[in-house]
Image (cartoon, grey):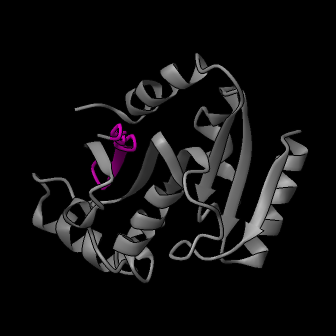
Amino acid sequence: PESFVQVHERVLAPLRKAKGRLQVLDVSTGSCNSLHRHGWMSLNADYTAIDLSETMIKQGGDMMSAAGVAVDLVLGDAVELPFQDDRFDVVTSYGAVNGLSDPAKAVAEMARVAKPGGVLLFLDEQLYEAATPVARAYFMKVLSSHNVIHHCPVESFPASLTDVRVSQVYQFYYICTATKRAAPRRRVSSPG
């Protein structure tokens, strides 16, 4: 299995070589801490961060401003992203998907706003298979008690996502990566 750092490097390495400016969206961004800390700032990119909390958006703006990073901050809901289809090269979310009101809809929205060939990466709680009874109790009663689901919701991913990989990066956390399928080529038929 890949580690937290290895997953990020696998995703970031080809993006660093991309020609042109990338568009990066961080969903349920909170204070923008994960967007800033996990390698995304190494990209030639424009950054957009969305959160449902005005307080968190303000904290994110303050943090990114102090770091000298321009970011478009949007107040909005992860299950109804206010962005056009096929807009972002990268869509991330750290620690939010499992606790959203409709995780499947949130992932579908993340896929919708990703460009064909775009990458999704999100991290959340998931119990490791060899967990002891004590670890399982801690996970359910403390760590994951606020969640709607307690695992990566791959069973409800939209068909537009491919190359789905789930890595158990820590005892209680997974990272999921996926790529949005390129749009099918349309056949042009010549008249008769």
Q: Which residue is drawn at 35% across and 41% down?
A: 191
The answer to whether residue 56 is left or right of residue 107 is: right
Image point (77%, 77%), residue name = 54
Left/right of residue 19 with respect to residue 110 in the rendered view: right
Can the viewer see residue 168? Answer: no
Above or below residue 185? Residue 154 is below
Q: Magenta stretch containing residue 179, yes or no?
A: yes
x and y percentages locating residue 105 in the rendered image: 40, 74
Q: Which residue sits furthest front?
A: 192
Q: Where is residue 83 in the image (x, y as percent from the top left)?
A: 65, 64
Q: Is 163 in front, or is 71?
A: 163
Q: Does 43 lie within the magenta span?
A: no
Which quarter of the rendering shows the N terminus?
top left
- In the depicted view, which residue is nearer to us: 120 or 5? 120
Residue shown at the point (70%, 24%) measured from the top left = 20
The C terminus lies in which quarter of the figure?
top left
On the rendered structure, is 153 left or right of 143?
A: left
Q: What stretch is highlighted in magenta?
A: 166-191
